[in-house]
Image (cartoon, coloured by chain):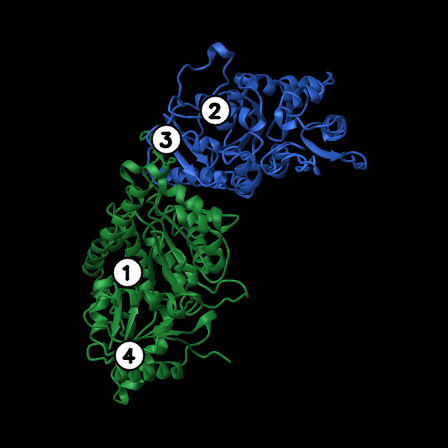
Amino acid sequence: MAEVFTNATQVLQGFKGVKKVSVEEYFTSGHRTCQGCESALVMRLMIKAAGPRTIVLGATGCMYVANTTYYTTPWVVPWMHTQLGSSGSAALGTAAGLKALMKKGRMKAEPINVIAFCGDGGGADMGLGAISATLTHKEYNCLILLYDNESYANTDIQASGSTPYGANTTFSPPGSVKRIMHNRWKKNTAGMLAAGHPECRYVATVDASYAVDMMNKVRKALSIGGPTFIHSFDPCPKGWDFDPMLSHELGELAVETGIFPLYEVEDGVVRHYGKTRAIAEGRPRKPVREYLLKQGRFAHFTEEDLDYFQAKVDEMWEKWEIPGVIPFWKEKRPAVPMP
Amino acid sequence: MAVETKTIAAAPGDTEMLISGSEACAEALALADIDVVTAYPIRPYDTVMQAIAKKIANGKLVAEYIVAEGEHSQFEIVKHASTVGARVFCGSSGVGWMYAMECLTVTPPLRVPMVAMVGNRALDDPGAFGVEHNDALVVRDLGWMLIWVDTAQEMLDTALLAYRIAEDRRVFLPIAISADGAFLTHSQALVQVPTKAKVDRFLPKYDRGDLQLHPDNPITVAPQANEDWVIEIRRQNNEAMTRAYTVIEEAYADFRKVFGRGPDNPWFEEYMTADAEVILMGMGTISLPLKVGIRNMRAQGKKVGLIRPRWFRPFPTEKMVAALSRASAIGVIDRDYSFGSPFGSGVVANEVRAALYNADKRPPLLSFIGGLGGREVTLEDVYKTADMCFAAATAGKSDLKTHWLGVRE
């Protein structure tokens, strides 16, 4: 049986502590993201981790519109826009083009990282099919990074499939008759992609509040070979309605409450890491209200809403087949009544 | 002058093959040594992807062959592969082409010289496999160069020409080659397949130059420009399309030198037009019933000719006007529709009307719609069309209506 031909990847060892992190910046001044924007930090850390021999493709969204105004690009590395639902296709096409040219000797053969990023609208909604397809094409090295600020934040904060239950968005404003306009539970995007693509070698969730961990997951995703996927959790002061100085703290609270679990799936092996690991091993989670009530988007929540949210998060850790990752139940799932 | 109506003498080294229009396209793609191709099934264009898959499986072509999960991804994948310097091919038909619409929109302003084949097919609903030209025509305003071909030989030759023209740095725009579904995609004919050495003489390697996305050339492509710059960028697209007129003429001249065949006039085929009082027009394989009908009418002493447009974008305005001005009446048969358009005419008829508006001599133009959904255009349709044109020539004016051919009422 012939081996599947794959280009070599770069070998990017993990940074051993924050003092060992490269001082070079490849995402610099020139962008106009909001104060406290975690997604901008994700971009900066992502490319710092990847290094200069990288091509970055950016799907439509905040990190396109706010980052790359004509003549003021912050990207030191080659960067190209792709369509909202095309992060998967952009990564695949770029990697395939490089591979073909290197194979035919028309381009110097060397490991070049290919990263395509998308927001939650571009990734969890519109581009999900293309990402799924790309994760099955194991002969192309590329990383798709979904920066999840839990709404279509560039177009005025509209609900996406990744918006949490009950959040106030411009498509789900709490009103006098309907308090909860957005009653869908957030998609389990990383878990779904890990479970659905058995030959994808690496899927991880990250949170820039834990920056070194986050960068090391990017480095692993780029080194392991084949298509990989990372889902980052990005507090958004504008979309979530909180003081920009709280971005980092909300990123921590989302993990500490168990709302956003940190894990990686490497060659099929699931591993919780960071504070999520302690939660998976039984350490008490912080109540979700500590996280929710710091944000204006949940200001209309009643006690019943908070209880419902808590009960759904409790299920993730107490009932799921693989806590926080795979939502299959060992027993028949009771319906949790919505308030 | 018409490549279709005479046997082409095989040039030394060429191979003669009995192949379909889609297979002829695949022969050209292997000769052009494409790098990345993306496939997704929809009839009738997908026969070209099947032919390419066989070539790769049998070692006749080395290329990345990616089966996409939909036409949107299909076109996006090759768009991005082209930006790093790969020669790419893609294609679709009917609603598949429409599913890729967003990607078709962004490809010209990104100056991606993609070559695509459209196996023309009626749009849903209702479902129909047969030919209509509305699929390819939907991108006519967006910077795609559009050409309609008539025979398998013309398909092979045009695919080679298309890479040469699209990848010329003065142009850098995508080209869609339209082939009538079934009538051309699936019909076999004898085709002269040239040698690789000849193709290499004619077609240089794709060089994206300083637009290549690579770590050695760290550029930012397609940033958010807004009103500050968009109109200048549109203007650059327009100038590229304008430069294509010269590049197309040059490419066909070189093609004739290298391959010893090909039309003197790249823009449209003229058939018995030298003394024609009535000129009929139609794109693609409709030329067959038109030519047969014209020969029969000529035998009765009726001076009828045919102009079969190849290039629809860029549109050969001056040359078309000059050729049409010789006639006493023109009959345009559209294999497409444009509901609510001026006079309810199809796209080609109104395009020709617009081209003629400032002409010194404006023959009456009659507009016809026929052959939709792959319906046969019969000789009776052709005779009726010509007779109405002769009447208009005598009257010196058109009825300004659009006549649907062969419709049950």
Mark 3 and mark 2 residues within 8 Å of each other at the beta carbon: no
Camera-side residue of B346 and B200: B346
Mark 4 and mark 3 residues within 8 Å of each other at the beta carbon: no
Tell me how far mark 1 sits from mark 3, CA to CA: 36 Å
The residue singled out by tag 1 in the image is B315
The residue singled out by tag 3 in the image is A78
Q: Looking at the image, which residue sits at the far top?
A: A19
| Residue B364 coordinates in the image, percent (x, y) | 28, 76
Mark 2 and mark 4 residues within 8 Å of each other at the beta carbon: no
Secondary structure beneath label 2: loop
Residue drawn at point x = 52 percent, y = 16 percent: A212
Write down the chain letter for disc 1: B
Q: Colour of chain B?
A: green
Tell me how far mark 4 sits from mark 1, CA to CA: 25 Å
The residue singled out by tag 4 in the image is B397
Q: Describe residue A337's horizontal placement relative to residue A87 as left or right.
A: right
Disc 4 packing (10 Å; few <14; some 14–19; many ≥20): some
